[in-house]
Amino acid sequence: MPDIVPGPRIAIIGGGIGGLAAAAFLRRAGLTATVYEQAPALGEVGAGLVVAPNAVRLLRRLGVMERFLRRAVPLDWGWEFRRWADGSVLSVEKLSGVCEGLYGDRTYVIHRADLLDTVKAAVPGEWVRLGARCTAVDAGSDGALLCFADGSRVEADVVIGADGVHSVVRGAVAEPAPPEYSGLCAFRTIVPARSAPDFALRPAQTLWLGPGRHFVHYPIAGGQAVNVFAAAPAGGSLDESWSATATIEEFHSEFAGWDPRVTDLITAGGVPGRWALLDRAPLRHWSRGRVTLLGDAAHPMFPFFAQGAAQSIEDAAVLARCLAASVDDPEQALKRYEAARIDRTTRLQEVSRARRDINHLPDGPEQQARDTALAGSDPLVGNGWIYGYDAEEALAS
Ligand code: FAD
């Protein structure tokens, strides 16, 4: 760890995975920062995440792998696509022994709270202010004045908006653009291992594809639980809050007639969460002056490539390097950061959006063509542009 040098006063709005990763990488680069998080405690909702090699290699550089590996489950099988009605396997990628050979690291699944805890371990506790909801960013040529819900104000030389999909900071760098209604909602539930069938406890990321819907599950929490996520038509449910819930019956009704391994998992879960998935077009710029965005605040994406958190970690690593390389010219640093990141994250937003239609084809000729293509594909190699990418090396080259 380099010595901390006097540098710009960096304010990070949001203490999610992206905001804490930014603080951790800034510390590694020898800078200091303050994280302002609106919640009274750092935490994440009960749901899982896939952590692919492009993020794992950056976590390794933060020196937090020991903690990560205590809770993460290494996947032996990834993108195991199955047919909705009978569970026939459409394609599956073997990861163990192959993924690390191709990309130097394995692919893991982990509870979101465990990933947050992992990243938090690399951030000094005194850098984090809790219960601090930013309400406005008044940007000037030398920095910005931040206003908080409790009436307090803070001056910062650089502002990083890591405040998620409803970002307040976004208003300081881009024209306001309302999110679009995607027509889809997400269900999620966690099934304790004792109630889960052995099938769902395999170290596999399984995706069941059916007309208008898909259903995903994989083990998390060191194998103590199964994470379930499903995308289905939203109908009238427009609540975007991660704390919104549905009933088990509503969840069942979306997957009536599906393979019993799917419906049994729905039964075994508790009250499911359900929220509307919104769509937002990619931004053409996300930095203005001394203010920038990171993670979902900059480039929210459908979760169908399992890359949103990974991209926020990549952003964090690159942003820290850019700021450390030009402490005397933060504006230039933010421009360099945006230029290094925007094409990649825009591409991921676009492919994630396209996956929505591909995953949800009704049974028929197009679905059969998709299934034939899946059978002949190797996503582990095909997605090499995602998993093989080293964000720090790409900046240096
Ligand atoms: P957030 O996690 O939204 O954090 C924002 C933080 O800012 C929060 O703590 C919030 O309280 C705080 N905040 C907000 N407003 C303010 C304010 N005004 N003042 C102060 N604080 C504020 N990604 C993967 O890499 N792999 C996956 O497998 C994967 N699966 C997913 C599955 C689903 C169902 C979904 C919805 C997403 C998935 N993602 C996945 C994406 C991933 O969850 C997000 O991309 C990631 O959490 C973004 O992190 P963030 O820090 O940018 O934003």
Image (cartoon, rainbow, N blue to C red):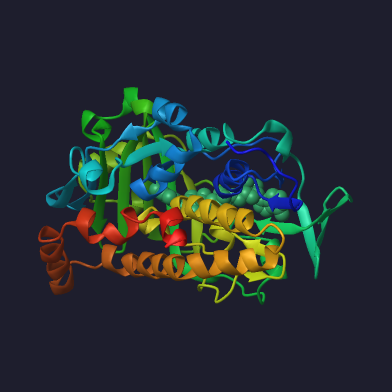
In the displayed structure, would residue 147 be above or below residue 51? below
Relative image position of residue 179 (x, y in whole percent):
57, 70
Nearest the eye: 77 or 107: 107
Indicate the quadrant containing the C terminus: top left, top right, bottom left or bottom right.
bottom left
Residue 92 x/y as whole percent: 16, 49
Looking at this view, is 333 or 109 the one in front?
A: 333
Quadrant of the rendered structure where residue 119 is?
A: top right
Q: Farthest residue in the top direction?
A: 194
Specify the quadrant of the image occupied by residue 203.
top left
What is the x, y in percent for residue 364?
Answer: 15, 70
Counting from the top left corner in percent of width and height, residue 214 is at 30, 55
Q: Mark yes or no: residue 234 visible.
A: no
Name the residue located 66 percent from the left edge and 58 percent from the top edge: 161
The residue nearer to you, when weighing 279 against 203, is 203
Residue at 64% across / 44% down in the picture? Answer: 15
Is residue 353 visible to us here? yes
Q: What residue is shown at x 52% (from left), y 51% (from top)?
A: 317
Is 202 situated left or right of 337 in this image? left
Total marks placed: 0
Residue 119 vertical placement versus 79 (above, below) = above
Give the quarter of the figure containing the N terminus: top right
- Above or below, comparing residue 346 to residue 297 in the picture: below
Q: Look at 73% across and 58% down and name the residue there.
A: 158
Considering depth in this image, is 190 or 314 the residue closer to the camera?
Answer: 314
